[in-house]
Image (cartoon, grey):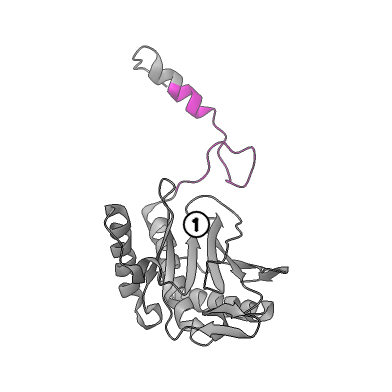
């Protein structure tokens, strides 16, 4: 019961709050969904970090996905995996590269994420090898509430990975690729291997619950595929 009323505001606020319909964020009738706690935020960040680390190491075995189109008869292949991370604030999108991501440990990748974020926010000049050196890109929308995305492949790359989190215990992995360089079946195998590696890491109780699931979507220049990957 509301006993203290400053110009009636607090009581009206309390009364309005009590009328809110609580429930799942996926229910259109819900007015307030579940709130994230510190552990959940940490889980999300570790999932993204591990997806980069595991993805970079996997890409060394998928050269077509760490490559780029030159012409109808030529393809370029990168020797190292420089994982580009999309940073976007106030219409200032930049993709900064975690260089040699395939050789870095998870703590090293987390530390580099922080360094690149500070560099991005500082407004200082960004070295060209970081600003334009990515060989593959990650676009993370897992904190936005988005359930689907179709990321666009960057120039001189053949793969971009997108992450969303439609439910608290589910991440969705999206991938767009250049069909002139790679085939859909190859991308499907890569994403399934990535999913298994990330899930095996979290099944050890490091961050999130075992019911973590991923669904993979593929888009290419010529075709659209959907592949459901059960937990």
Is 198 in front, or is 155?
155
Name the residue rendered at 35%, 79% in the picture. 104
**Residue 110 image position (x, y, % from top left):** 33, 68
Q: Which residue is label 1 attached to?
A: 142
**Secondary structure mostly seen in the magenta stretch:** loop
Query: What's the magenta region?
Result: 13-35
Asked whether, in this view, residue 32 is left or right of residue 52, the answer is right
Residue 5, compared with residue 205, is above or below; it is above
Residue ID at (44%, 23%): 13
Q: Position of residue 87 (x, y in %)?
A: 41, 57
207 or 99: which is nearer to us? 99
Q: Residue at x 45, y 82 (%)?
A: 57
How packed mark 1 is, by other alpha carbons closer than 10 Å (few <14, some 14-19, many 20 or more), is many
Q: Is residue 76 magenta?
A: no
Q: Nearer the viewer, residue 95 or 211?
A: 95
Q: Where, quadrant-wise, is the N terminus in this rendering?
A: top left
């Amino acid at each position: 019961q509301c006993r203290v009323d400053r110009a009636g505001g607090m009581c009206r606020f309390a009364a309005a709050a009590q009328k809110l319909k609580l429930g799942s964020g996926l229910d259109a009738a819900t007015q307030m969904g579940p709130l994230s706690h510190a552990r959940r935020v940490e889980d999300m960040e570790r999932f993204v970090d591990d997806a980069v680390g595991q993805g970079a190491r996997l890409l060394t075995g998928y050269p077509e996905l760490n490559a780029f189109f030159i012409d109808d008869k030529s393809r370029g292949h990168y020797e190292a995996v420089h994982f580009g991370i999309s940073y976007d604030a106030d219409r200032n999108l930049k993709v900064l590269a975690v260089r040699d991501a395939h050789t870095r440990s998870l703590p090293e990748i987390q530390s580099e994420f922080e360094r690149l974020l500070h560099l991005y926010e500082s407004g200082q000049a960004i070295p060209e090898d970081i600003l334009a050196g990515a060989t593959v890109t990650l676009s993370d929308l897992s904190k936005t509430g988005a359930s689907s995305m179709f990321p666009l492949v960057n120039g001189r790359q053949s793969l971009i990975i997108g992450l969303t989190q439609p439910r608290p215990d589910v991440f969705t992995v999206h991938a767009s690729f250049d069909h002139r360089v790679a085939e859909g079946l190859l991308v499907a195998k890569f994403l399934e291997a990535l999913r298994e590696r990330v899930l095996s890491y979290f099944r050890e109780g490091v961050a999130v619950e075992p019911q973590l699931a991923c669904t993979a979507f593929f888009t290419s220049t010529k075709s659209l595929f959907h592949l459901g990957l059960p937990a």
